[in-house]
Image (cartoon, rainbow, N blue to C red):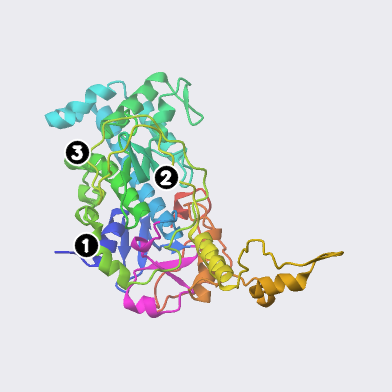
Amino acid sequence: MTPTLLEVYRQLLKTANLTVTADNMISGTILAETEPVLVEGKRLVLPTPEFQAMDKSEIVLFHPLSEMITRGKSPVLEKFRSLLIYRFNEVASGHIVKLLRIAVEKENHKHLTPDQSEFLSLVKHADQSTRDLASKVLDAMEVGQTARQIVTLFLKKTGLVAGKSHKRVGVVSFPLYEELKKPEHDIWGIKCRVKDKETLAALLEFIFPRIGEAQAYDRGTDSDIAPNLHALMQASLGIIQALNDITEKFESQISTPEVPASVHLIDADWQETFMNLGMMQAQIWRVPPQAGNEGVPWDEPEPAASTTQAPQPADHAPRPVAASAPGVHVPPARVSLDEVMARGASAAQSQAQPQPQPQPPQSDLRYTDRGLDFSSVIRSNPALASVEPFAPVQPPPPPQTSEWAQRATLALNRQSVYPGNYPSNYPGTYPAAWPGNPTGPGPYGGAPGTRRGLI
């Protein structure tokens, strides 16, 4: 049975550990505190009929499946991506802390199952100093700094994955692991022993079994429906599977009376739907495109095609990629949709103006001692008499959208949506209570570079 659009959106939000209130507003849990999710200072909400009919000056609708396929990431998608990355790093950090605790508490090794004992040989040099170092390294991770994360994920327009060219690519990288493989005796400036770097690297290899393989967790897509969102979620699956495997394997050690291990499992109930997004097309069209979801023009330089090939798990993109001739894929020159529309309008106007028809030389043209007699030219080609030599050029028609949507989208495109950059005092006012939620909490204005500044 095909799920509803709102059901799919609830599943996506749950993957990022976000919740939906009874009045369909979206909140997130950061450091055990629930906060409203904001996009450029506006409350993020589900696209219910009630919110579609409301004034959008204080809300942004979560409708990423409506993105324009010719454009890049939207502010809403960027906010969602940042919250996904936070969730992945939060769970991965917890696994590192818990596994090191298990490794150091040797008196409890007898209680481990054979599957659980597998990693002990990889971290046999771990001690209390290793645990202390890990805590310092994890504390040095800052939201919004890609170079200081356990795992991160970004989107690329076109690229190769396992030798195949795709319209969009979700690229997964492991900055901490890359730092651990460097020869220096420090981690992000934190002095350490060689054996500590080796232990932490081995631990990450245990959590992410294919971390040492190039492009092993990258995914590409050729979906004609929300390709940026589709690439993001497909690339997330490999991360989710690896983290969930650790949670399930060490469930008895991770669980506490207050917090069961199931809290650390990352849901991916949307997976089957994303194998065939075409079945959602009619529902997607029923909700008009919303400001902040369309996507902004691609402005980064076109990345060079990578020739690195690596084994890749099956990709569930809706449409397979047709086999192509060997060689480097050179994408066509980018032309924005607005430019195409402007060209079309200009061409239509130029065709509307009467144009003089080229005429072969006529024998009845008269020449005087001053040169060609212009009256004879008019007689030879009467159409020239009606031509306006300096017809005014009309500007292209304005986009067919509301004035509010144009202003709102421009405002959303100007301000960064990456986590940690949300200002504590953003321009404008923020209502103490949202419509329909008079007792709801206000937004948190976290300091840049802190986990509290994420939502």
Query: Residue drawn at (36%, 59%), measured in percent from left and top?
Result: 28
- Give percent across and percent down for residue 408: 51, 69
- Give percent across and percent down for residue 421: 52, 53
Query: What residue is shown with label 1?
Result: 279
43 magenta-colored:
yes
In three-dimensional space, the C-alpha distance between marks 3 and 2, rounded to whole angstroms, equals 35 Å
Return the mark for residue 250. Answer: 3
Residue 114 picture quarter: top left
Foreground mark, 3 or 1, reads 1
Q: Relative to 83, is 357 on the left or the right?
A: right
Which residue type does callout 3 highlight? Phe
Looking at the image, is mark 3 or mark 2 earlier in the sequence?
2
282 magenta-colored:
no
In three-dimensional space, the C-alpha distance between marks 2 and 1, rounded to whole angstroms, equals 25 Å
Query: What residue is shown with label 2?
Result: 156
Query: Residue drawn at (31%, 42%), measured in percent from left and top?
Result: 219
Looking at the image, is mark 3 or mark 1 earlier in the sequence?
3
Return the mark for residue 305. Answer: none
Q: Please, is residue 114 above or below residue 409 in the view?
A: above
Asked if one can make out residue 388 in the rendered structure from this viewpoint, the answer is no
